[in-house]
Amino acid sequence: MISGFAIARLGEPGHAGLLMSQPSLPTVLLKPGDADRVVAGHPWIYKGSILRVTRPPEDGDVVQVKDHRQRFLGVGFFNSRSKIHVRLLSRERAELDEAFFRERMAEALAHRKRFLPGATSFRLVNAEGDFLSGLIVDCYGDIAVVQITSLGMEQRKAAIVRALARVVAPRVILERSDTPSRKMEGLEPRVGVLQGEDPGEMRAVLNGLDFDLPSLGGHKTGLYLDQQVNYRDVAAIAAQAGVQQALDAFCFQGAFALHLARAGVPRVLAVDQCEEAVRQAHANAARNGLGEATQFEVANVFDWFKQRTARGPSEKLIQPFDMIVLDPPSFTRNKASVPDALRGYKEIHLRALKLLRRGGLLATFCCSHHVDAVLFGEVILSAAYDARRTLRRIAIYSQSPDHPVVPAIPESEYLKGFLFEVAN
């Protein structure tokens, strides 16, 4: 049971916003062949796919989309300032109003209750994964954090807040709409309180562990919730394998480190270059009674690895770790920077493999959708070749169920990970 929220009764019939008679909307007609991707389920329509528009809509307006043969495909928000000219939200003739948002949020909450039961910190709305492109909502107990990345959603913020209040009844609703992607929609960053009073701090509970977070600071909406299931599963394998000494590289607020320590790993070292995140991780360890088993260090992980893998011609490299977790931030935000990102991924894997004992475990993750699982795996194997280590794959990881993947929308699947055993 997901606690901390009360599901409101939707009550009135027709709350889905279905129209009895669709008012005249500007119509976006697609070029021949460009409708196929939309019919398959992708909600983004780029400028280059548009044949013509029947009448000029205002940016942020609702438009209907049809193929070149005038067959209806759906309705969505228009923005001429964005590379994504239309974001489809419904394949039906629907009013994109408060009732529409209320129903979509209720469906999203039901999905979380079904596939992530018991969670009190979770992502309620995952943009395209919940068919609400441009909107993210994260829940931490009775506090909801909204992130808006599209003009159409920005213009309907009041309706979104009212719908959220009806569906989950949070004590406080905060806004963390400060991502760089807003610039592409012609939007300025916004951070603040949308409902209630700023609590100053939030409390997140992941798999029974407590994390204190700044309410309007830190990364994203506060914590990386997409790893929630992986935190638990990696720690369970560490306990099963009898890991004695582990490294959590790019630890952020120490979620992997704390899960490993609670699972019984007696010595866990966690490293991150963000001083504030490391300070918070140290406090979280103390809050959960795991201070003795954990040690935190502020350092650039690349430099840290280089220092510990450097050796003279006659020196033997010490391999102190039974497990290393690599969970770096994304190394690439676009396709052009993928080659540089791959070099970065190879570097940290090469160094990590040099510090693992034989039989040691490497849990490694990539959160860029520009680097797919196949390419990521190839980089790891290339690093293993250079390090003269042979790997056995033990597990494959993805994002938690509250970050649902829609196969027709490749962008909705970004987190991938593997667990390897160093065979020799």
Image (tube, rainbow, N blue to C red):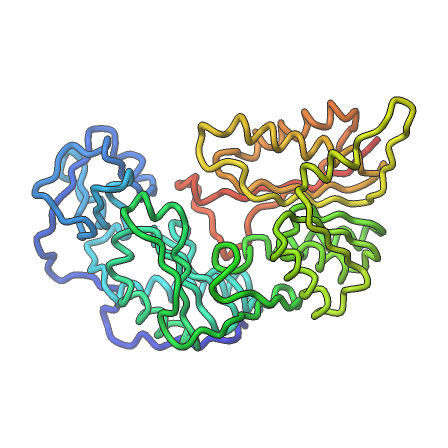
334 with respect to 104 (left or right): right
Q: Position of residue 279 (x, y in %)?
A: 66, 60
Number of numbered markers: 0
Q: Closest to the observer: 355 or 273?
A: 273
Q: Quadrant of residue 290?
A: bottom right
46 with respect to 262 (left or right): left
Q: Closest to the observer: 14 or 75?
A: 75
Q: Position of residue 18 (x, y in %)?
A: 20, 61
Q: Quadrant of residue 395?
A: top right
Q: Position of residue 208 (x, y in %)?
A: 66, 68
Which image quarter holds the N terminus?
Answer: bottom right
423 with respect to 296 (left or right): right
Is 260 situated above or below 308?
A: below
Which image quarter holds the C terminus?
Answer: top right
322 with respect to 366 (left or right): right
What residue is at 53 percent from the left and 34 percent from the top?
372
Q: Quadrant of residue 341?
A: top right
What residue is at 86 percent from the left and 25 percent from the top?
312
Q: Closest to the observer: 21 or 255?
A: 255
Q: Closest to the observer: 295 or 423?
A: 295
Q: Position of residue 338 (x, y in %)?
A: 51, 29
Any part of residue 394 in sight: no
What residue is at 10 percent from the left and 59 percent from the top?
21
Any part of residue 55 in sight: yes
